[in-house]
Image (spheres, rainbow, N blue to C red):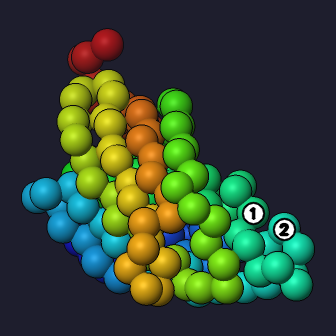
């Protein structure tokens, strides 16, 4: 999957549009994607404090991990499992998520994701397991079952 394909895939997903995730880098050979998320007070627990809600950062882990696997497979890879570790609460800052595939098999892929703030500090780390089974319909070929 090319960078333009990744941009199209992210742009076509309603939840990704809702989050306002912006792809900034993709390497299909290495299974790496980088996504940006600009700060929005709507992502906070309390606007005055400015701390991100953990669900927003968990969603960013999920999207970055799935997209890292997807750039290697060439199609969407739905989430099977997700683990998120909060190192520190990001506050009033943009976020960068770097997803890296660790293993890509016929049925399952594993990707690690690191989220940093605008100062480069690690805020959240996570690992996801994703289905790599091709979700596209099989072509019907006469004479085969």
Q: Residue at the spot x=53%, y=46% of the render? A: 85
Distance, label 1 to label 2, CA atoms, is 5 Å
Q: Residue at the spot x=34%, y=47% of the render? A: 112
- Farthest residue in the left direction? 29
Q: Name above or below for residue 107 compared with residue 69.
A: above
Q: Residue at the spot x=82%, y=79% of the render? A: 49
Q: In this rendering, would 66 be left or right of 143?
A: right
In contact (CB < 8 Å): disc 1 and disc 2: yes
Image position, residue 47 (x, y; %):
87, 81
User: SS of the residue at dot 1?
Assistant: loop
Q: Residues within 10 Å of mark 1 (few under 14, many from 20)?
A: some
Q: Which residue is mark 1?
A: 53
Q: How many marks?
A: 2
Q: In this rendering, would 99 be left or right of 29?
A: right
Query: Splitting the image into 4 quarters, where does residue 31 fall?
Result: bottom left
Image position, residue 98 (x, y; %):
35, 65
User: SS of the residue at dot 2?
Assistant: loop
- Seen from the viewer's position, the closer of residues 8 and 93 is 93
- The reply to whether residue 2 is in sight is yes
- Seen from the viewer's position, the closer of residues 140 and 65 is 65
Q: Which residue is mark 2?
A: 45
Image position, residue 19 (x, y; %):
66, 72
Image position, residue 110 (x, y; %):
32, 37
- Specify the quadrant that holds the C terminus: top left
- Specify the quadrant that holds the N terminus: bottom left
Disc on the earlier residue, 1 or 2: 2
Q: Name above or below for residue 47 compared with residue 58.
A: below
């Amino acid at each position: 999957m090319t960078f333009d394909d990744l941009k199209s895939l992210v742009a076509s997903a309603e939840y990704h549009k809702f989050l306002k995730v912006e792809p900034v880098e993709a390497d299909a050979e290495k299974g790496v994607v980088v996504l940006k998320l600009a700060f929005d007070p709507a992502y906070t627990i309390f606007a005055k404090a400015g701390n991100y809600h953990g669900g927003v950062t968990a969603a960013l882990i999920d999207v970055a991990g799935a997209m890292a696997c997807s750039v290697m497979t060439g199609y969407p890879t739905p989430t099977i499992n997700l683990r998120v570790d909060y190192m520190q609460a990001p506050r009033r800052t943009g976020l960068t998520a770097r997803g890296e595939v660790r293993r890509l098999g016929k049925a399952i892929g594993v990707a690690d994701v690191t989220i940093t703030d605008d100062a480069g500090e690690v805020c959240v780390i996570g690992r996801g397991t994703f289905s790599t089974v091709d979700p596209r319909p099989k072509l019907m070929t006469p004479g085969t079952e």
